[in-house]
Amino acid sequence: MAASIIETCHVACSANRTPNVVSWGRGGTVAFGTCNSVALYDPQERRVVALLNGHKGRVNAVKWVHKKDNASERHVVSGGSDNRIILWEAQHGKFVQSVECKGHTGPVNAVDAVYLEDSKILISSSSSDSTVRLWLCSDNKEVECLHNVSFGSSFMMDVSLALLPGTGVPILACGGDDSRVHLYVQESSQLQKAMSLQGHEDWVRGVKWACTGDELLLASCSQDSLIRVWRLCAKSGTDTHTEDDHTVIKMKEDVFEVKDRGMVSRFAVSLETVLAGHENWVYGVSWQPPVYEGGELQQPLILLSASMDKTMIIWAPEEGSGVWVEQVRVGEVGGNTLGFYGCQMSPDGSMILAHAFHGALHLWCKDQDKEGGWRPGVVISGHFNAVQDLSWDPEGEFVLSVGSDQTTRLFTPWRKQDSKRATWHEISRPQIHGYDMQCLAMVGRFQFVSGADEKVLRVFQAPRNFVENFASISGISKEKLLQSSGSASLPEGASTPALGLSNKAVFQGDLVPKTTEEGERFSSISDQYQESYFHPLSLTEPPPEDHLLQNTLWPEVQKLYGHGFEMFCLASDSAKTLVASACKASKAEHAAVLLWSTATWRQLQTLPYHTLTVTQMAFSPDAKFLLAVSRDRTWSLWRRKLPTPENPEPPFSLYAHTAKDTATHSRIIWSCDWSPDSKYFVTSSRDKKVIVWGLCVPENSEEPAFPPEIKPCSSILDVGDSATAVAFCPSLCSDCSYLLAVGLECGQILLYRWRPGQEGVSGSDWISGGGTDTLQSHTLAVKRLRWRPRAGRAGLENGEMDGPSDTERKLEEKSSWVQLASAGADHSVKIFSVNKRAL
């Protein structure tokens, strides 16, 4: 029932900053760890199709369990910082937690798994407790730890499993900080060390097996910038010993024996090639998946590698000589990013994917028109740390979010020409800061104020380049948008000076024309190091990560000084003429709310009342009231005096408040919001209570002689967990009840309908409308909830509904659907579509 009320429209998230956290399945789905969840991403649909929530710590390693016949996988295995390994199994089209492996005493940093011949699953895992373990998962959901290999004081960075050719014996490769690759085979229920492969001169970061018929190839990569490929093949008993034949020059072979079902098999390992091409640590290697040729599976000899030098290389042997050479090199240029942590190849080899230190996925697709050419592809992106605040623009066309990853990001729906549904993408990163971002408020269609862990507020305005690109991506007419943003004086873009924090505007005259001749001498030193790194883009699709970092910044138009400590919360009124701000405070003198005028950016007023940090503020929709809630467990309500000719910007005065004894809430009040008719407001607190207060609007319009008593209008709603966010839906339900969303510390979002005037019987005025299920919920606290200011779903109104026959559909869309955006401490921004009819 609940699933039909709340649909997940979009999840913006990024990959964790660990090497083994992305895996591309044979069915085309990419699985990656994001905070404590495993995200399943469909590169064709360009959206996260599912989130698997089960880990209690960061997910560090994710691996699909590949089937022998190359069909879509039914199992995926993940390891996390909670020291656990979880095997997920597909049941009725959904992945559910099947088996849990407990035993490691430190975070798990690498996993791999293979199917054995009796359809049991063998899992290998490496952990920072300096052990590698082998687990056997049987069909009846039982798991046993078969082996536990301790490496003393050294750590294994990666593990890889395969079955020895011609036998059913598993072979395990481990690479670690002793610069060697260790091979283990399982014999008569014992794990025997077969050999150690020497050659690397620094930590081994990745090992991967590939099966080519009756041979195995092992690729290992290291921090010595080199990749080594080893060949493992069976030696028959008739192979003559050529130790004493010194006339033949051949690679040194290491031989080991394996007993399997009474038979003794001998295997030889030799070095196939050393690949040098990267200029920094090589973090990941990946073989192209096997493809069907002539009805049987063939393993292509194609190897992909990713390095901290920000490049990925595809290696393959030359046709004539068999010498391994670099075929393709792709990468990123510019930006203050580190390199790549790992790489994956699509099942057909036409796409390659890397993930980077800042969580971004980088995708390249084979260019159909250009032989041997690769071009960047469109992927999703998101914050790589907790998201603190978000806001819709006044028209409900895009969402802006700020996070502890020091960025401000802008997400909007985009529809490819031939696709049916719109997908959400990050099309701009207006602010990349040096402090953790904390709060933001929109002041107009293309202007916002943001606060970080610093005492200054910064005001940003969209440049012309963004407005033009937003028009082409969203399908709204450019002229209309430029009118609403005052186009005459708009700069082209923005760039950050080399040592600065402020985004400086770049105007038409500042743009550096690209010089045609490379050999032109620089006339001065300053020409060599250009101040502006901004190049205007003309976008028809969402930009890749390196463009987001460099070419989509918004210029900073103002700084606001006045607070004594780090910024904590912001609010703007419905007319976008006022901004209220508050900072962290442990004394009353710092806990005052400051009011700013958006016309002059002057400080208008100081509103002192609270004694500790004001945690959230909200202006009433009719802009007559300002509500503030605080860590001191009280709220304060400020009323705006009526404007007079001599006082066009009327001051606010304290209208009502709760004291320590009348507060009702017994813990910090986290969040507050107003009903759409400005009559009621709601507060939510760590004491698990949600309370609606009122009535704020007097029946007659005159100023009352004395403030009326504002008291709880609802029965106290206990939501069972600390209520960290609350929001009133701007449109009422069909039975004229108010719709509220409550976000909890555990990550769940609950929907409630509230009807005034029924608080006689305890709790009868609250009607539960369900909530997000475990797959839809955040895994950590919900930081902010914001309803879309207009009814209907973003991205559906412009494109799909054009003809006159669509008028009914438009009406139905508006009357039945509303959208809710949520920001979570689990690094994700989620957008839910809520069906009011189903409520």
Image: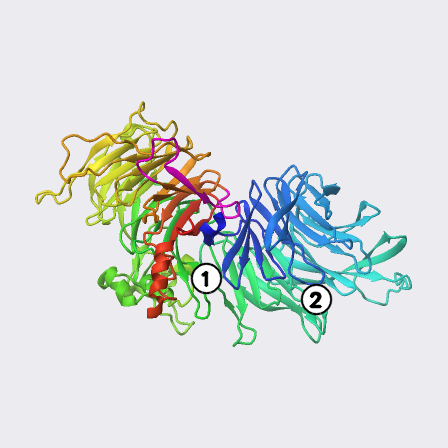
- Which residue bears the numbered disc 2? 299
- Range shown magenta: 755-779
Image spot of residue 544 (x, y percent)? 46, 61
Overall secondary structure of the magenta stretch? loop
Does the image show residue 253?
A: no
Q: Quadrant of residue 349?
A: bottom right
Which of the labelled discs sits on residue 31, or is there none? none
Which sits in the foreground, 822 or 478?
Answer: 822
Q: How many marks?
A: 2
Q: Residue 361 at what x, y percent from top left?
A: 51, 57
Q: Is residue 197 left or right of 509 when viewed as pictured?
A: right
Q: Which residue is mark 1?
A: 544
Q: Is residue 799 above or below residue 437?
A: below
Whether pointer 2 and pointer 1 mark residues with C-beta atoms closer than 8 Å, the reply is: no
Measuring from the top left, give residue 226's x and y in whole percent. 64, 58
- Front-lying residue, 629 or 196: 629
Tag 2: Cα neighbours inside 10 Å, few (<14), some, or many (≥20)? some
Label 2 vs 1, first from the N-terminus: 2
- In reply to whether residue 377 is colored magenta, the answer given is no
Q: In the drawing, does residue 638 fall left or right of residue 178?
A: left
On the image, which quarter does residue 665 sit in? Answer: top left
Q: Residue at x 81, y 59 (%)?
A: 268
The three-letter code of the residue at mark 2 reads Gln
Give amino acid for label 1: Pro
Give the secondary structure at mark 2: loop
